[in-house]
Image (cartoon, rainbow, N blue to C red):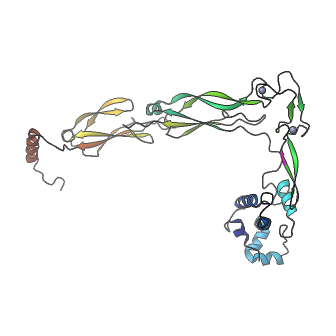
Amino acid sequence: MPRDPYQVLGVERSAEDGELKKAFRKLARELHPDVNRDDPEAEEKFKEAAEAYEILSDPDRRATYDQFGHEGLRSNGFSSQAASGGIEDILSAMFGGGNSPFGDIFGFGGRSGPAAGGDVGVTVEIDLAEVLTGAEREVSFQAVTRCEHCHGNGAEPGTPIRTCETCGGQGAVQQVTRTPFGQMMRQSACPTCNGEGKIPDEPCETCDGVGRLRKTKTYEVDIPAGIEDGQRIRVTGKGHEGETGAPAGDLYVEVTVIGDDRFERHGEHLVTPAKISVTRAMLGGTIEVPTIEGMEEVKVPTGAQPGQHVVLAGRGLPTLRGRRRGDQVIVLDVVVPKKLNRKQRHAAEELDEVLDDPHPGG
Ligand SMILES: [Zn+2]
Ligand SMILES: [Zn+2]
């Protein structure tokens, strides 16, 4: 008895078309007869997966299976290409495109075209004050760029460029692979011209005919105010140059914000602990605290409590989008002296007497 097709593909019974396709594509890659020549079971497993997909990707078959199981499919006259040994048809359908449910499943339909350039990553460091103002940094990095000597066509200037004879200028060739299930047609980049379709008579001396070469590039990055540590800025098209006709990759600039012990950052807000004496807490007054813009005098209210916040509104960091600035929050820490000299002890005892409050707050 054949296995449950949902189980074969490893999907839920509610799986939608996209999920089915994804699951089957993954299995088919793993079980493909081409990559499993040594595994005699691979062919059977591949067939099983193909059959499961055949059933579930067809709404009529799927509905019939859901209601009546494999028995229902048989009695309703649904025959399986995969089960009836037509794996060649399936493969050609899969690799050759077309209208079958397997068409284009490997994305091999048509020429893949010139390859886009890769992305480049760099890191920059800024400090907290620059988070407030925003910053500019010049970054240098190695990237594939267009060869200026040949303007990217790979030919020594003034020498002719021929059309590639192997691919007739198409840049792609059809390859026929023999598999246990028959011949398979596959399209791949032309090995003679590396997919360019053209071959220079005299390759450019600077780039060896590639048309591109690695060079140090520099770029001035604008780092916006309010950026968070670890955030990346994407600069479109500033990465590696792509093959002729394909887009360049992107430049990613990862920003490291150097920590500052005096401030704890919570998004756009800054938190600063500040120690005050018992008497300052009782009497109030002013203390000096660091802000992102320098030292500043801050008022401590009379009767300040341990952990109490003094908020400097709008003195934090800007938000990444918009002009609002967060707050700086000063958290008061009341320091109780651990030792007293005679004079202090005397004063404390006198205070204790006049406060006359053995259970404060009780
Ligand atoms: Zn060149
Ligand atoms: Zn070629």
Q: Is residue 62 left or right of residue 352?
A: right
Give the residue at x 15% y 55%.
Answer: 359
Number of numbered discs: 0
Relative image position of residue 18 (x, y in whole percent): 71, 58
Q: Is residue 213 magenta?
A: no
Relative image position of residue 103 (x, y in whole percent): 82, 56
Q: Quadrant of the C terminus?
A: bottom left
Q: Is residue 353 left or right of residue 274?
A: left
Bounds of the magenta segment: 187-192
Which image quadrant is residue 69 in? bottom right
Which image quadrant is residue 335 in? top left
Q: Is residue 97 visible?
A: no
- Asked whether 354 or 165 is in front, the reply is 165
Relative image position of residue 93 (x, y in whole percent): 85, 58
Q: Is residue 305 left or right of residue 111?
A: left
Give the residue at x 76% y 37%.
Answer: 246
Relative image position of residue 310 (x, y in whole percent): 31, 40
